[in-house]
Image (cartoon, rainbow, N blue to C red):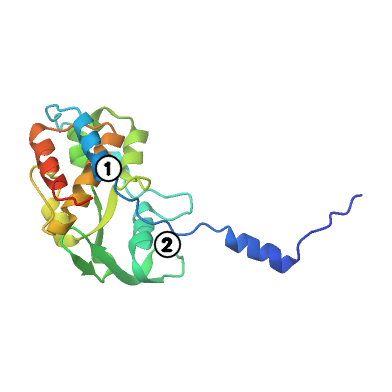
Amino acid sequence: MHRVTLGLPIAALLLAVVDTAPALADPPPPPSTATARTELAALTVAAPHSMDGYARDKFDIWSTQPDGCTTRQTVLARDGKELQDKPDHCQPASGSWYSAYDDTTVSEVAKATIDHMVPLAEAWRSGADTWTADQRKAFGNDLKDPQLLIASESSNTSKSDSGPADWKPTNHAFWCTYAKDYTHIKSVWKLTTTSNEKSAVSSMLDTCTN
């Protein structure tokens, strides 16, 4: 029988485990203005697809992540400030969340809604109607790209399932980031655009200073 000798004191081993715990991720950053313009130019312009068969449930939003928390809970934890966790450490008990669409701060968990930068219905109209169930689930719960963000109830309701051709944030200072992120999502997911949407996004990109 061979005896295994530990090379590190137990305290050091415990510290190593703590140090390797994943840190809470920041929201994905927007691409540069130059990249956004290149991505916008490359989007395919096409007529919107039919909404036949569309349902939000087909995107399986707020599914459970590998750590056991839902996508919504993950975004609340990622983007919240001064968070107080509930015992299960998934659903925050309290905190504050910034809504960039209307430059307001939400201080109630229930009123911190999670918005899809490219709305699910817009994705359906621009190509998601042909996707598999797994592709739609990945889109509806996309944490890798700048697709999910905090929005106040009023701004989320105002936006609904509209794209930039029909809706823009009341916070003009966010137009640049909104245009970059929206374009990037459509580019990553190979979704189509319309001439009106392309023109609206291009105009918002004109507000970028870098």
Reply above or below: 159 against 187: below
Q: Mark 2 or mark 1, which has the lower sequence index?
A: 1
Towards the viewer: 75 or 34? 34
In the rendering, at what x and y percent does residue 25 appear?
A: 42, 56
Give the left or right position of residue 105, taking residue 86 as reference.
left
Towards the viewer: 84 or 177? 177
Q: Can residue 53 be seen at all in this image of the molecule?
A: no
In the rendering, at what x and y percent does residue 115 appear?
A: 24, 52
Residue 204's disc number: none
Reply above or below: 82 against 121: below
Residue shown at 13%/41% (left/top)? 202
In the rendering, at what x and y percent does residue 13 appear?
A: 69, 62
Q: Secondary structure at mark 2?
A: loop
Towards the viewer: 210 or 31? 210
Amino acid type of the residue tagged 1 in the rendering = Asp
Residue shown at 24%/34% (left/top)? 38
The residue wearing badge 1 is: 57
The residue wearing badge 2 is: 90
Residue shown at 29%/48% (left/top)? 30
Give the left or right position of residue 95, taking residue 22 as reference.
left
Give the left or right position of residue 13, taking residue 194 as reference.
right
Amino acid type of the residue tagged 2 in the rendering = Cys
